[in-house]
Every structure is written in structure tokens, then in C-alpha cells.
């Protein structure tokens, strides 16, 4: 076969999908991919938990978990996050190791995402090395709220009702939910989908439908219940709405091409780019950010003396309820 014939025969096969089964084939693929991603996420959590202890280096835990995801046949849906104490989310190791270590009295959240062909699961847990009485129930609070929220998942329910429940449970334990954070729908190639699953009852809501994938995500805080952006940023993602922009640097163009192909609109670490490109990562990224092609995800922090716990599981909404994937 010459090139043209090859091309034609490819088109032939493409032109003849079994129309009747097309939809269910797609559903089948979605289900299979989500379950596989969920399975990997479960295994990675089990693998990484015992490695999270006082004295462990953040960089080692993070890269170890990311490596395990790939070893098991998955892809990272976003850089593994390891957020300590008042840091609520979006910390991953920077391009140049900052030496971050787990210390006595820390509360550590590990948040990981796995995808298979763009079908994503998102899950997180908290480990506590602090015996302070004030913090005794902080993990129980987040896990109890998560379990209660999960039980409410089924088609027709508005997520506002679930938000109310989550809020009342966390407050019942004398902690605060974090108003800027919470659960969310997950769509293909999109970690934060259209629908929200807030952890406060006053933040509106969306109707749950069969086939939706939701990350039920709970934060309990001893602080104000609000986070702010710090000035550290180690996670980025492509801005899918930015059109063509002029790029002066060769490295920017190369990096953009790589991101488009490899991560699409999923978040990535500057660290990952450094593994791929020996030079020009920092300047290239800077230009892409300046031109609006790349979005920044700054480390999010509660007030300085606060402690934050997090737990998160991904579920698929079924006809009468849900299937837990992670
Ligand atoms: Mn997460
Ligand atoms: Mn999430």
C-alpha cells in the first residue's frame, strides 16, 4: 500500500462506525477508563501513605507518587499536591527543590489526580502528626462530611442541598468549611467541570444528572474559612480561550507545542517541563503567561496559624445513586 492508499483505508474504517453502538461504545470506554483511573488512584494512595512521615521530603513523596501513577499505566491529571498546615491547596514541588520537609505537628494533605485518555479521577486524604486537642476531630469532620455528602448523590438532587449538609457537619465539629474551595464536576480533559459541589449551603448549586462525574471535596479549617493566593506558583495550565499570540522566544513556541500535545488543558508542573527541556523553561513560561496562553495556579493559604484538613473522592452518578471510583 502506498501512502495514499493507507490514508484511504484509514478513512474507510473511520467512515464505518456501527452507528447503533457508537454511543454505548463511548459510554463503555468512559466507564472502563474511569474505573481504571480509580483503581490506579487507590493503589497509589495505599502505596504513598506509609511514606508520608515526619522527616520525609515533600519532593520525594510527590515525585514518588507521580512515578507510581505512570508505572501503573495512568497519567497524572495534575501535579501531585502536598499541602501542609495552613496551606490548603496547589502546592507541588517547584522546579528547584525548596527542601520542604514534613515536621512534627504538621497536618499534611496529599491530593492526586489520575487520567486515562482524559477520563479523570481526583482524590485526597489528610495525615496528622499533631496531637493538639483542638485538632483531634479535624480529619473525622472532613471524612464524616464527605460520607454524608456521598450518600446524597443521585440524579435530580441539587448540589446546594449537599453543600448545606457539608457545612452543617463541619460547623458541628467546630471547624469551618473553606468558601473558595469545594467539590466539582469532572469532565473529560477538565478537572473542574461546569457544575459545582460547594461546601457551604449559600453558594448556589447545580442539578446532578446520571453519568456526571463529581469530585466530592471537603476542607475543614481552624482558621477563617477563606484562602488567599500566596506569591508562589508551581502549577500552570493552558488557557483554552486564548487565541493565537505572537511569541518571540523559540523556547516558548516549543514549550507551547509540547503542552498542547501532552497536557492539553490539564494542569502541569514547571518541574515536569524541566524534565523535558533542559533550558529556557522559566523564560518560555514567563512569555506564555504574559501573552495569556498559560494560566497560573498559585498556592492557596489560610491565615498563618490555621490548620486545614482535606478529603476527596470521585464518584460516577448512576441511575439511582453513585459508584465510588477512588
Ligand atoms: Mn483534588
Ligand atoms: Mn478536586
Image: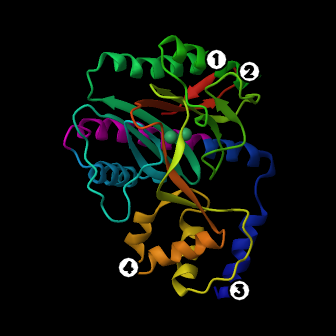
Q: Quadrant of residue 12?
A: bottom right
* Dot placed on the residue nearer the N-terminal end, 4 or 2: 2
Image location of residue 191, percent across then percent down: 60, 47
Circle 1 SS class: loop
Q: Earlier in the sequence, mark 1 or mark 4?
A: 1
Disc 1 to disc 4, how far (Cα)? 49 Å
For the residues labelled 1 and 3, say whether their Cβ atoms are less than 8 Å apart.
no
Which of the two discs, 1 and 2, labels the residue nearer the N terminus?
A: 1
Q: Crowding at label 3, few (<14), some or many (≥20) Cα neighbours within 10 Å?
A: few
Q: How many numbered badges does the structure rendering display?
A: 4
Residues under numbered marks 1 and 2 in contact, where contact means CB atoms less than 8 Å apart = yes
- The residue wearing badge 1 is 152
Taking the image as drawn, is residue 186 in sight? yes
What distance separates the C-alpha of mark 1 from that of mark 3? 55 Å
Residue 259 appears at what percent x and percent y? 55, 69
Residue carrying label 4: 278
Amino acid at each position: 500500500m502506498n501512502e495514499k492508499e493507507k490514508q484511504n483505508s484509514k478513512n474507510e474504517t473511520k467512515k464505518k462506525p456501527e452507528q447503533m453502538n457508537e454511543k454505548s461504545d463511548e459510554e463503555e470506554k468512559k466507564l472502563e477508563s474511569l474505573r481504571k483511573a480509580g483503581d490506579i488512584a487507590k493503589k497509589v494512595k495505599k502505596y504513598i501513605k506509609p511514606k508520608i512521615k515526619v522527616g520525609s521530603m515533600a519532593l520525594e513523596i510527590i515525585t514518588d507518587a507521580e512515578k507510581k501513577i505512570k508505572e501503573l499505566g495512568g497519567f497524572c491529571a495534575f501535579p501531585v499536591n502536598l499541602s501542609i498546615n495552613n496551606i490548603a491547596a496547589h502546592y507541588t514541588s517547584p522546579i528547584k527543590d525548596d527542601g520542604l520537609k514534613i515536621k512534627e505537628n504538621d497536618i499534611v494533605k496529599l491530593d492526586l489526580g489520575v487520567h486515562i485518555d482524559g477520563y479523570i479521577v481526583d482524590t485526597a486524604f489528610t495525615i496528622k502528626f499533631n496531637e493538639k486537642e483542638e485538632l483531634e476531630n479535624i480529619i473525622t469532620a472532613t471524612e464524616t462530611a464527605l460520607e454524608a455528602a456521598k450518600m446524597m448523590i443521585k440524579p435530580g438532587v441539587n448540589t446546594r442541598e449537599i453543600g448545606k449538609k457539608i457545612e452543617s457537619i463541619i460547623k458541628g465539629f467546630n471547624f469551618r468549611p473553606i468558601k473558595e474551595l469545594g467539590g466539582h464536576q469532572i469532565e473529560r480533559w477538565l478537572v473542574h467541570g461546569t457544575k459545582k459541589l460547594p461546601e457551604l449551603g449559600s453558594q448556589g448549586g447545580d442539578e446532578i444528572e446520571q453519568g456526571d462525574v463529581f469530585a466530592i471535596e471537603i476542607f475543614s479549617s481552624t482558621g477563617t474559612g477563606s484562602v488567599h493566593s500566596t506569591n508562589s506558583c508551581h502549577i500552570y495550565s493552558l488557557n483554552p480561550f486564548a487565541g493565537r499570540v505572537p511569541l518571540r522566544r523559540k523556547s516558548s513556541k516549543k514549550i507551547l507545542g509540547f503542552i498542547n500535545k501532552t497536557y492539553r488543558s490539564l494542569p502541569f508542573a514547571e518541574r515536569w517541563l524541566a524534565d523535558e527541556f533542559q533550558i529556557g523553561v522559566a523564560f518560555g513560561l514567563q512569555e506564555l503567561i504574559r501573552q495569556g496562553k498559560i494560566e497560573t495556579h498559585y498556592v492557596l493559604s489560610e491565615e498563618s496559624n490555621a490548620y486545614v484538613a482535606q478529603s476527596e473522592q470521585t464518584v460516577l452518578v448512576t441511575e439511582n445513586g453513585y459508584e465510588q471510583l477512588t
